[in-house]
Image: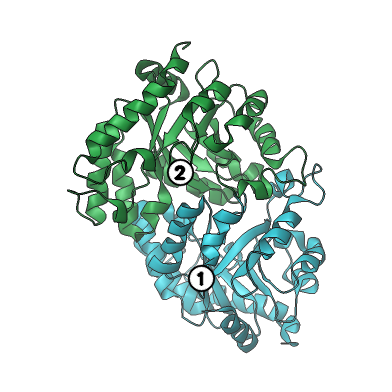
Chain colours: A cyan, B green
Amino acid sequence: MNIAQLITEIKAKQSYLCVGLDTDISKLPDGISKDIDGILAFNKEIINATKDYAVSYKINTAFYEQLGSKGWEVLEKTRELIPSNILSIADAKRGDIGNTSTMYAKAFFETMDFDALTVAPYMGFDSIEPFLKFDNKITIVLGLTSNKGSLDFQTNDLYSPPLYKTVLEKVSQWGTMDNLMFVVGATKAEALKEIRAIVPDHFLLIPGVGAQGGSAVEVCENGINKNGGLLINSSRGIIYASSGKDFAEVAREKAKQLALETRPFTTHL
Amino acid sequence: MNIAQLITEIKAKQSYLCVGLDTDISKLPDGISKDIDGILAFNKEIINATKDYAVSYKINTAFYEQLGSKGWEVLEKTRELIPSNILSIADAKRGDIGNTSTMYAKAFFETMDFDALTVAPYMGFDSIEPFLKFDNKITIVLGLTSNKGSLDFQTNDLYSPPLYKTVLEKVSQWGTMDNLMFVVGATKAEALKEIRAIVPDHFLLIPGVGAQGGSAVEVCENGINKNGGLLINSSRGIIYASSGKDFAEVAREKAKQLALETRPFTTHL
């Protein structure tokens, strides 16, 4: 799946919604077994319930790794459940020296055939370039994150321009809008206009809506571009919206709500 | 295993050697099957051959992840092969928002029982703190890395003090020398004196000796402290020193050489 297909999907569904599959055994709802098999069963139901509104699914690798190799197996099987017209993102925040980054790229882009992968920028060009070399795959580099710790290095008082702007400026020269996106937290919607001045064309993956407090409408108001250019992620706010047997139905309703909320920002597409 | 036990081990073996198990099917030597089982067999022989000189083993997760869940299983089994008196490091460079970092910490510190884990600093305090909360576990944060890309953000012309010094200064306040180390590339030996001015007591994990061109002696001259305070990693230079059936013997010899090279710097312990 490539960016052109993603844009087609956004137009068709009039939605920027990315559903985060941060699935945790301790939070599985009634009617789902509270074990490793329950994770896969839950993911399957969530995907089926939300796929009419989601243009992307983001799987957070940490939740699967904590369960060891059996968890990694569920990660692989969950990847296989994502329909081919919907962008699959591994939220893994990898990055290492060149030959090691190539191994990570193979793990996620070849072995598991994810469409996209999140990557940390600290180690610079040769830690990111290996990911960008894979055809029809998308590297999503951390820009400005949604958490409080973003104040420590990304936007501290020491550096002007702030580190995250330097990251956006440099990294955007290493790839194109077809193989590169950036993570920008929804809790930083006010920064999106400045970010759009640096990266007008690239897609932005926006976590932090819902449980973390960001507003999808504010994100659209400040972050939209001519292709839409946004993937707005909600994880806990959708998948754990109900802990009852109606969890899938409620998740569908929450996904629909979020898609409708941002629908006015898809009319120009 | 804790820092006091590591120091005891360094004294006993008069060595700072960390052996990196970056095991790649395509590089397995003669006499080892060129498949996933071969990786485990190879790691077992390398560990047995080098354990008299190594005070630590570092497993690079990328090499295992590229093989999918079966590779993750070999990662788990390799962890189990590391003797309990030798520090086990997962070189995974993880880091995410708080609740996700806690999941990664559980994956490596609990599920797999690694003694230590490498972590990327870009997302700041709440991405690192969850790792530091685990008792008797060591978080190893990227400081100044060995690759060329370190010039992009860690030591670029824009920022004074350079980003890596800000990372060392801030992060060193979040942990103690008992639960926190830093990664400093051996290819940056000249920077070690300045780094020691910022973090005089913490252990430093030093990759980049051997294949990447760093000198173990220069590292010691500039980086040693009262407890030794160094783990000097060699991966390819030891484990792939011979592609013949004598690979274990040659690996042992290379490990011994590196230990002997830095032995003069252990006499003060």
- Name the image quarter holding residue B241: top left
Label 2: how many Cα within 10 Å (few below 14, some 14–19, many 20+): many
| A28 sits to left or right of A7 | left
What quarter of the picture does the C terminus of chain A occupy? bottom right
| Chain to which mark 1 belongs | A
| Chain to which mark 2 belongs | B
In percent of width and height, residue B11 lies at: 40, 16
Q: CA distance from mark 1 to mark 2?
A: 38 Å
| B82 sits to left or right of B161 | left
Q: Amino acid at mark 2?
A: Asp
Q: Please name whichever residue, A241 or B145, is drawn nearer the observer in this view of the structure.
A: B145
In percent of width and height, residue A242 lies at: 55, 67
In percent of width and height, residue A213 lies at: 71, 60
Q: Which residue is mark 1?
A: A247
Q: Please name whichever residue, B45 or B94, is drawn nearer the observer in this view of the structure.
A: B45
Q: Please name whichever residue, B210 or B64, is drawn nearer the observer in this view of the structure.
A: B210
Q: Which residue is mark 2?
A: B91
Does dot 1 land on a helix, a strand or a loop?
helix
* Label 1 close to label 2 by CB (< 8 Å): no
Residue shown at the point (70%, 56%) measured from the top left: A167
| A4 sits to left or right of A156 | left
Q: Is residue B183 above or below residue A253?
A: above
